[in-house]
Image (cartoon, coloured by chain):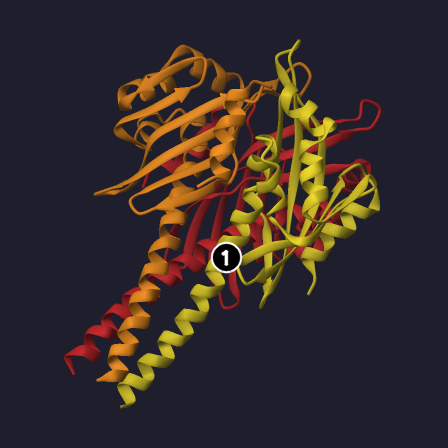
Chain colours: A orange, B red, C yellow
């Protein structure tokens, strides 16, 4: 059955390509979920974007380890004060590099705050971000997100440079 | 013909997955069309992103009902003044949830304005957005867009929280 | 073999749809690569997003022709000063129109700079962008990017209006 064998080969090739497109889409959606989760104070939804022991490294400031730390940040006084004063964690569409059950993505994240007296927003932070993602039994999660302010130091440039090699 | 039946089942499964990927892409493209349409003053192109009786609810300000209202906003004095002074309606890549012929998407929208004397832009508005979309005979359109300024009130947080449940 | 012929037709149709989805994804990834390349000073990575003789037209300012010009801009005093003072070239997810081996995409690009004394960022530039892309033997590249500041002039509106016709 040459015809059927040839069709099967074409189908298998197409399945692999659709797998890769879905991986891209799922990782992009994972990252697009972060802003709405933290800006609405949905602590568990935000934490669950990470693996159970996933890491959120806010370069030069602090590191959160695992769901409890991340949820505690969302529920903490600092973050709650931000969102009750008006705040957006605005992330851009990522550059993604897939490698089987792992992936790395890079993008930018704004921390933008409402200035009520002047009726405008100001940009408190613009960070370079690297997302190390992993596919698990229930889909893609963040293993480690590193986030570093673009303040002229070498560290954020080094992070973004990872996207240009390999 | 077991082989052919098995191939047909794999093909049908792949067709469903490609349908979903295309839906994601079309909804993302629909939303990515808004900024270029309104910032270029293309009133009909902007209005046609919505269904004929689609709603654009600018929370706390006003509501547009149907194509004529949306086109009138683009052609109106307020919007024309904005774009002739320099303005960008800058939207982020959305979080999308598909459900058959309906979908909901969430993202952020900046209203950014040129400050000629100081040669810089300022952020007049950063809104939380919810897009209720529907597939019709000629593709996806917006049934209702709700847009609320992230000024610290509960309303935009509630809107974004929808993305974290269900 | 009617069954097999029918399956082959469905498979061929699906292959064409997956080709289009991959083209969208590759063009989106090409554009998402620009910011991380220039903000990390990766001159060759930035230049290689273009075809060998690709054009980067910064409307009203200057035009770069080919890889050497683009790499020289990244390595030049102006750009190096920006990134060492803290800067982000932040691009949005594009509206894309495919046409065989050619494509055009439109998006926004921020040039955002760190203001160390005031511990905040300011927006030096927000531009309308049109990307003319072409598929070559090793994938999609930029044939011409045109970038014009949204300062109220007609030129950026005209550029964005291209996305609404044809």
Q: In percent of the image, x 23 and y 71: which residue is there?
A: B9
Whether residue A1 can be seen here: yes
Image-based side of A133 in relation to B152, left or right: left
Image-based side of C52 in relation to A160, left or right: right
Q: In percent of the image, x 44 and y 53: which residue is there?
A: B24
Relative height, residue A4 to residue C70 (above, below): below
Name the spot of residue A80 as percent of width and height, x first.
43, 16
Quarter in which the N terminus of chain C is drawn = bottom left
Image-based side of C134 in relation to A5, left or right: right
The residue wearing badge 1 is B26
Name the spot of residue B147 as percent of width and height, x first.
56, 37
Label 1 CA crowd tier, 10 Å (few <14, some 14–19, many 20+): some
C16 or C139, nearer to the observer: C139
In what element is the residue under mark 1? helix
Whether residue A88 can be seen here: no
Name the spot of residue C157 as percent of width and height, x first.
77, 48
Q: Name, please, the residue furthest toward the front.
A: C68
Relative height, residue C164 to residue A53 (above, below): below
Quarter in which the C terminus of chain C is drawn = bottom right
B89 or B60, nearer to the observer: B89
Name the spot of residue C60 as percent of width and height, x first.
83, 41
Q: In which chain is the residue bearing label 1? A: B
* Residue C114, image quadrant: top right
* Residue B52, image quadrant: bottom right
């Amino acid at each position: 059955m040459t015809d059927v064998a040839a069709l099967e080969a074409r189908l298998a090739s197409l399945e692999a390509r659709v797998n890769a497109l879905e991986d891209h889409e799922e990782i992009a959606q994972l990252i697009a979920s972060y802003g709405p989760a933290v800006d609405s104070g949905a602590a568990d939804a935000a934490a669950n974007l990470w693996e159970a022991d996933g890491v959120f490294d806010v370069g030069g400031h602090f590191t959160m380890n695992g769901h409890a730390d991340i949820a505690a940040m969302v529920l903490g006084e600092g973050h709650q004060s931000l969102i009750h004063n008006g705040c957006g964690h605005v992330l851009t569409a990522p550059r993604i590099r897939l490698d089987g059950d792992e992936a790395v993505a890079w993008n930018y994240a704004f921390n933008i705050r409402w200035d009520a007296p002047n009726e405008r927003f100001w940009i408190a932070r613009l960070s370079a971000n690297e997302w190390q993602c992993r596919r698990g039994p229930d889909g893609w999660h963040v293993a480690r997100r590193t986030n570093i302010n673009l303040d002229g130091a070498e560290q954020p440039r080094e992070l973004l440079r990872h996207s240009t090699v390999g």
